[in-house]
Amino acid sequence: MKINILISIIVSVLSILFIGCERELDSPPLGKVDESKILKIEDVYKIYADSGNNYMFKDDYMLYVTVIMDDASGNIYREAYVQDETGGINLYRLGAAGVTELNSYVRINLKNVTITDYSGKLELVFDNVENPKRQIVILKSNVPVTPAEVSLSEIFAGTYDCVLVNIKDVEFADTTQTYATFGGSSYQNRTIQNCEGRSIIVRSSDQADFAGYPVAKGKGNIVGVITKHVRNGTTWQLLIRNVDDVNMEEDRCTSGK
């Protein structure tokens, strides 16, 4: 009899713990997502094209994407970049740092999120979301996206906006610089170029934890997220996640500074 009572108590406790764990899950549960309201990033761009700037989602539309850049290094703040097989986009004004995790596969509930064009870059803005972290649910960790190997010409064609890329055979034009100004309060532009002299900006925050590091001296590859800024023309920029994104140990094609 005592054994039966003990077993009953154990089953009851386990049931309570299980129910408690269930309540920790984000709502709506995965099994109840309306498949007709699952979007791709390319769909967000189409909605923007059809509906114009500052369109707000009113229903529980979902994006399933991978985080290709978070704000852990301080190079961006309270934002992230995400990507799926159709493209990439910026998540902006997330309310706090650390809301996303690099290389995590997430489900984003877009309810009350606004699509905004910021100087040519499309953003999903969370201004009207009470708790962005509850609408960005990590489904799986450590699933990195392989960066697309691209040339500068391909970047300038506009195909890789907000996408993780690997630019090969480039070097910093001025090797006397640091990535940004340590202790500063702005952003700095550094130029990388290929052996044909074509160039693009590497843009870094003075608040990045690598701000005071000297730029790489040699030639090689650099990984980062491509963005653009449109004002009196289009300026293409590269954002690195950390200095591990830079691998330039080959001989330079120019003498540099």
Image (spheres, helix red, strand yellow):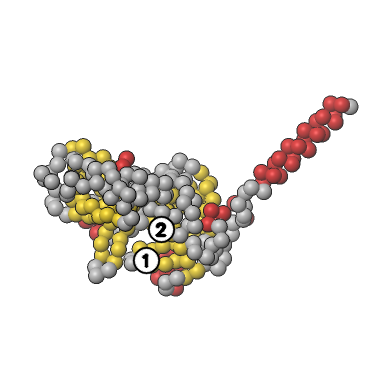
Three-letter code, disc 2: Asn
Q: Earlier in the sequence, mark 1 or mark 2?
A: 2
Q: In this view of the protein, which residue sits in the foreground, 212 or 105?
A: 212
Q: Return the residue found at the far bottom.
A: 51
- 205 to the left or right of 113: left
Crowding near the residue tagged with mark 2, few <14, some 14–19, many ≥20 C-alpha atoms within 10 Å: many
Rendered residue at 38%/67% (across/down): 117
The local secondary structure at tag 2 comes to: strand
Residue 55 screen position, x and y as percent: 47, 70
Q: In this view of the protein, which residue sits in the foreground, 181 or 46?
A: 181
Query: In the picture shown, does residue 217 fall above or below 108?
Result: above
The local secondary structure at tag 1 comes to: strand
Rendered residue at 30%/61% (across/down): 228
Count of numbered badges drawn on the protein:
2
Labels 1 & 2 near each other (Cβ < 8 A)? yes
- 252 to the left or right of 78: left
Instruction: Say if residue 255 shows up in the picture.
Output: yes
Q: Return the residue found at the far right.
A: 1
Q: Quadrant of residue 252?
A: top left
Q: Quadrant of the N terminus?
A: top right
Residue on which disc 2 sits: 90
Query: In the picture shown, does residue 219 fall above or below 110?
Result: above
Whole-number angstrom distance, CA of label 1 to CA of label 2: 10 Å
Instruction: Say if residue 245 shows up in the picture.
Output: no
The label on residue 118 is 1
Q: Return the residue found at the far left.
A: 255
Q: Quadrant of residue 244?
A: top left
